[in-house]
Amino acid sequence: MRIEFLYWDECPSHDQALARLREVLAEEGIREEVHIVRVDTDEQARALAFPGSPTIRIDGADIVPPSELPLGLACRVYFTDDGRVIPLPTKAIIRRALRGAV
Amino acid sequence: MISFALPATDGRIVRPEDFAQARVFGVIFTCNHCPYAQAWEDRLIRTQRDYADRGVRFVLISANDPARVADDSPERMRTRAQEKAYPFPYLFDETQEVAKAYGATRTPEIFLFDAARVLRYHGAPDDNYEDPGAVRHHYLRDAIEAVLTGATPATAETKPVGCTIKWK
């Protein structure tokens, strides 16, 4: 399993999102390395198909496949299970994606 | 406080002087697209509604360059203000001069003034953008309560948390 964490430094929750990802990996007993990719330019964002920060991919698949998000340097919108907007994925979102990939 | 004259989503030109009777006046830089702004949006709406009868008025300002973020165009600002039934004017700072004059850098970022228009609080709405039920420090509400009772807010400044303003 290849786990990638892509982020843009101007979005303030990337540290929290990375810590959350690592927590869930530990809770699920997954010892794979997290490949961290810092995205700094629009060109890099387009090349990486980066829809916003933070983005987590497992074996190349986004844990929440974006529908019509433009690519570029932006903070990304996620939704809780009860529909609230949040700027980083919940542990439940990350866990579901990991279990689906195992 | 720094004055301004900016167009609202309903076409009116809005100035702080229009709210001369307000006992507390909040200038809040925000935008449509930012998840932090969206996460706090309902709390700002609720706070405005809760305190409207006590002379508290907010104006929201988006200074983002729509050429960089299409979701922050004046047309989409109008749509969002209507969809969410904003109880405050939503202004477009096209030249970004107002945001620069205030020194705003993030969305959302609050500047709260007392009746004499002295800045009494600057920063984030509260300490938890993720979960309204887990907020421990209600910075904005606590500052409003303090100002309304003639007291000094216990917390006058916090670090604004949110997306960066998208400059031209």
Image (cartoon, coloured by chain):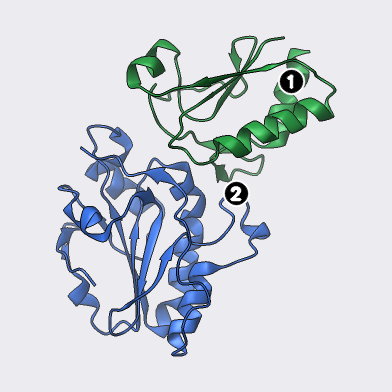
Q: In this figure, which residue is indicated by the disc labeled 2?
A: B130
Can see residue B92?
Answer: no
Q: In this figure, which residue is indicated by the disc labeled 1?
A: A98
Three-letter amino acid code at the position of disc 1: Leu
Write the residue at 38% across / 24% down. Answer: A72
| Viewer-nearest residue: B69 or B159 | B159
Q: Position of A35 compared to B103: left or right?
A: right
Q: Are marks 1 and 2 on the same chain?
A: no
- The quadrant of the picture occupied by the N terminus of chain A is top right
Q: Chain of mark 1?
A: A
| Viewer-nearest residue: A4 or A100 | A4
Three-letter amino acid code at the position of disc 2: Glu
Distance between mark 1 and mark 2 Cα atoms: 22 Å
| Viewer-nearest residue: B76 or A50 | A50
Write the residue at 30% across / 41% down. Answer: B72
Helix, strand or loop at mark 1: helix
| Chain letter for the green colouring in the rendering | A
Q: Residues within 10 Å of mark 1 (few under 14, many from 20)?
A: many
Image coords of residue A37 (percent x, y)? 53, 19
Can see residue A23?
Answer: yes
Image coords of residue A95 (percent x, y)? 75, 28
Helix, strand or loop at mark 2: loop
| Chain letter for the blue colouring in the rendering | B
Question: Badges 1 and 2: C-beta atoms under 8 Å apart?
Answer: no
Q: Residues within 10 Å of mark 2 (few under 14, many from 20)?
A: some
As drawn, B73 above or below B24: above
